[in-house]
Image: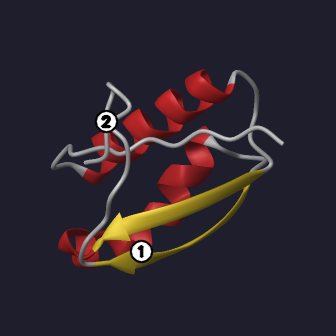
Amino acid sequence: MQWSNYLSTRPSLEAAVKEVAEKSLELLGTTADLGLVFISSAFTSEYPRLMPLLKEYLPETVIVGCAGGGIVGMNDDGKPQ
């Protein structure tokens, strides 16, 4: 099994989704079968837009996830953020 992860700190939902999808696929080196997505509660008013945006970049990927107040991930240097 291969996996990748990416965390975006972009303030725009569109830019964050694009960055995460592109970087995750780049790191993975292939398409993704499953996407586990965690979105910050800072985007609460934009939740309805999340799935359509994700499907633009990951049309064949099964996506599951949730929202949270403290989202963590790895930065470009591979360090926790």
Disc 1: CA contacts within 10 A as few (<14), some (14-19) or many (>=20): few
Amino acid type, label 2: Asn
Residue labelled with disc 1: 48
Disc 1 marks a residue whose amino acid type is: Pro
Relative to 67, is 58 on the left or the right? right
Where is 33 relative to 22, above or below?
Answer: below
Q: What colouring method underlies this structural image? A: secondary structure
- Mark number for residue 27? none
Residue under label 2: 75
Q: CA distance from mark 1 to mark 2?
A: 26 Å
Mark 1 falls on what kind of element? Answer: helix
Q: Nearer the viewer, residue 30 or 2?
A: 2
- Residue at 21% over, 49% down: 12
Q: Residue at x 84, y 42 (%)?
A: 1
Q: Nearer the viewer, mark 1 or mark 2?
A: 2
Left-right relation of 5 to 36:
left
